[in-house]
Amino acid sequence: MRPVSRLRLRSAATALLAAAVVAPVVVVVTAAGASADRTYYVPVTKTWTINGRGYGHGRGMSQYGAQGAALQGLSYEQILSFYYPSTAFARVQGRVRVLISADWSSDLQVRPDRGLGVRDLRDGADWRLPVRDRIDRWRLTPVPDGTTAVQFHDGSGWHRWEPPDGRTTFQSDGEFYARGPLTLLIPGGSDVVGTRYRGVLRSVRPYAGAVARDTVNLLPVDKYVQGVLPYEMPASWKTPALRSQAVAARSYAAWERSQNPDRYYQICDTTACQVYGGVRAEERTTNLAVQATARRILTYRGEPAFTQFSASSGGWTAAGNTAYLPAKRDRYDNYAENSVHKWTVKVNAGSLENAFPEIGRLIDVRITRRDGNGAWNGRVGQVVLDGTSGTAYMTGEDFRWHFGLRSTWFNIEPTPIIERWRSIGGANSSVGTPVSGEYAVDNGSAQKFTQGRVYWSRYTGARELIGPILSAYRQWGGPASNLRWPQTGVMKAPDYGHKARFVRGMIYSTPRTGAHVLYGRILDRWSKAGAADSWLGYPTTDVFEITGGLRARFEHGRISWDRSSDSYQVIRF
């Protein structure tokens, strides 16, 4: 992710997150009803608007929050104490083994840098490699008998170099070293691309008997952190923020090293661990932050702390699996420069139907578990998809990665129909509770409720209809009729009556007359006479065609309209 122009904040320390990004578990069962206050219906457009908070898993330090705290004057020690309570400072020594993922070939190729040497890891024997004008690269490469050859390249191709002690190949793995950084040649297109790394570069079998080799960078922990920090936090940020990130990154590396003491690598160089770019990543300000906090890490009960961090907490950190990763309100994360504290995206809900064909047409999504912290009751833990053929289950992380959301702290905006339903009282409203999903009607949509229906169009919004007026409207043809869409819900009218206005007419109802449709000239004339308050009373018929015009009967008379003369005849009974 790139919330700033040049550098990126990442959800580093995501070993647990990587395990969560797997295919969702699907369980198909009979679809059932749900509580609508946690139910998000699919609109006929299939487009959801999702509002969210934060970026990343939210555990531990918020990187934007660290900057926000620094802007408020906190020191890096205070920042770390806030995000990792119950930890203590300590110092770390030694080196760390980093898997270089970009070097996917089994050859480890380097430039002939100053003081370049090679070492056989079986017995530790090492040699300075010769300097010749035509040599432009060296490599460690596996040979068919399972050993490792040292070769050099010149204008005529690759040639084997044999150590002066008589061995022709290395029986084990090997490594290059130099007086300064090594230039690793990584496959790129039809050629190779040079990237500089401090420390040594090893060609290592990933397991005993393997033919392939991986490239591993072995270097001091602080030199490693110099290649991490600029990729995890903008180098232009405040010094306390950079220093807190340096300690968090170093602590995480120490934790990974403690978890993998014997593995051929201890940490990777991608977002699955921490992003590491070698010398090319380094910046002056971030190197100074590393040097100012040299060897400092956070510990818990004497062991390196698992200092997870993510770009933005959104205002609440998420609980981890340790005492020093609690869920807590983050007062430093919300400030103007944090563009991911709050966010909004539009997604295609229909894509879930493609991902889970077993459910049929998706009706709604139910969020059945959240962590209970902050807006909308916090981060989403479990999501249930209700379809016409069954139900599927997803974790909040599954849902997040399916739509590419920034975090699991999100809320789906209600459809206009559900928004209207909530505004008139929800389950306590005149229409009752939902009994269907939203379905297409003409150029809009509708949804069934236990006591009525709500209709929506782009021009009239969502309006509820119930009882005899709803029945009369549906019998008349609904939105496809000449009445078109309702402009109001059912309203009270004189003498215990009810009414609803539509784009091209009205429906009036009383217990004694039933519900009837009025429109056009008949409605105009009746309204001019005083409508239900007039001597005519309520309609007892719908408007109907007569020769040359229209007519409707009322309790105490009738109105007829002649089309050719545009004249009325009003008769009292």
Image (cartoon, helix red, strand yellow):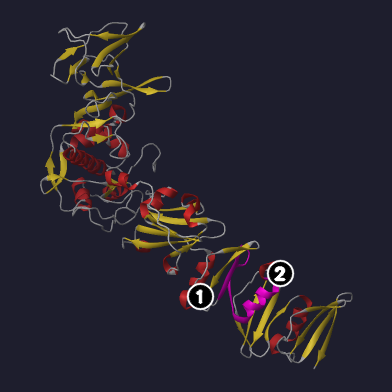
Relative to the observer, which residue lies in front, 296 or 545? Answer: 545
Q: Nearer the viewer, mark 1 or mark 2?
A: 2
Residue 424 shows which numbered tag?
A: 1
Of residues 76 and 445, the one drawn nearer to the viewer in this rendering: 445
Q: Left or right of 10: which side holds 147?
A: left
Q: CA distance from mark 1 to mark 2?
A: 26 Å
The residue type indicated by label 2 comes to: Ser
Taking 92 as reference, is 188 above or below it? above
Q: Which residue is mark 2?
A: 481
Whether 449 is drawn above or below 205: the answer is: below
- Magenta residues, start to end: 452-477
Is 459 left or right of 169, judged from the image as shown?
Answer: right
Residue for point 39% across, 43% down: 3
Residue at position x 63%, y 72% in the image: 487
Q: Tell me if 242 is positioned left or right of 369 in this view.
A: left
Give coordinates of residue 247: x percent, y percent: 20, 41
